[in-house]
Amino acid sequence: MSADSAYRVETTPRLAQWRIETLSSTYRKSNPFRIGLWNWFLTVERNKQFCVKLYPEVSSLTRDQPPIASFVIKLVSSSSSSGRKTIVHPGICDKQLKNSDDFVWAVDTLFTGKLIIDVEFLDLKVAPSSGGEPASIWTGYPITKQSSFTALTALSRMLIDSIHTDITITTSDGSIGAHRAVLATRSPVFHSMFSHNLKEKELSMINISDMSIEACQAFLNYIYGNFQATEFMAHRLDLLRAADKYDIADLKEACHESLVEDIDTKNVLERLQVSHLYRLNKLKASCMRYLVNFGKVYEIRDELNLFIQNADRELIAEMFQEILSTWKGY
């Protein structure tokens, strides 16, 4: 038996078998093997008990979509003295496996001779990133994923190719066609516009004069599922304003989280004003901490003086309260 074959696990789409001719050491780890979306490992450890572990390889996929596994595992040993012996685990149902300690099977038998570790996967599920019930990768998951992808592609084409548009959005420097039904589904404000006898319904036109056509296109791309990271970064403040105005909570939260991530001396005062205007508590706390706790307030004195002259009085009071509270701690 070659050294490589001693660690190789044979597989079918749902079955894995590790054949160990002799277990001379107290610990052995298999080569990675593929079942479903993940690479897996088996390990055996022989001490006071005989322990078997099964776990997926550490990866971004395992972190973002850890497998929820149902399987039957058994140990089959054979030797010239004791013959063939099989020990079957009671079974695992819908257990999430992320690391090497999530499934550990300890048995009191200390095996001698040849050993087969047999794992039959009954199902593997993943939980949707958007929430909801886990779906099997072998049944509902691929169908659901394909259906969602196809639907988003079709929705994007409706916007890109102006297929049967029935509303026109006018911006500060141009206009874009869109669809009432899509806008109303994503925004309660748009829904209200089209449900009542307002001018937007009568004229089939929405005036968004505080947005450029590029920012509005990014806004619509998000609504239609045709969004690009580059345009998001380029238009975050415009998108935040639109998300707040038209009550699109998921877009507002995405902008909020993103604005927290790259605060610096050039943008911190603007971000602080934005956080106050749109009630973004996490962003406000991060800006305050950056300015006060890290002492950046002393590096932008000229900008701060101008900011104090023009900013909301309530916000200025909060800032000085934060400074006084921090000084008391020293």
Image: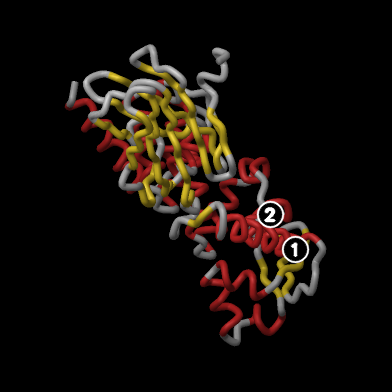
Badge 1 or badge 2: first in the primary sequence: 1
Residue visible at 30% across and 42% down? Answer: 318
Q: Amino acid at mark 1?
A: Leu
Residue visible at 41% across and 36% down? Answer: 98
Q: Is residue 147 left or right of residue 289?
A: right
In front of the other: 329 or 186: 186
**Residue 182 in view in this figure:** yes
The quarter of the displayed image where residue 209 is located: bottom right
In front of the other: 37 or 3: 3
**Residue 211 in view in this figure:** no
Q: Amino acid at mark 2?
A: Asn
Checking the image for residue 226, the label placed there is 2
Checking the image for residue 159, the label placed there is 1
Q: Dots 1 and 2: beta carbons under 8 Å?
A: yes
Residue 130 in picture, x, y percent from top left:
49, 55
Residue visible at 37% across and 17% down? Answer: 27
The image's colouring method is secondary structure
Q: Judge the density around disc 2: few (<14), some (14-19), many (≥20) Cα neighbours within 10 Å.
A: some
Residue 3 in picture, x, y percent from top left:
55, 13
In front of the other: 42 or 235: 42
Q: Is residue 146 left or right of residue 115?
A: right
The quarter of the displayed image where residue 212 is located: bottom right
Q: Judge the density around disc 1: few (<14), some (14-19), many (≥20) Cα neighbours within 10 Å.
A: many
Residue 190 in picture, x, y percent from top left:
58, 72
For the C terminus, the image quarter is top left
Residue visible at 64% across and 70% down? Answer: 182
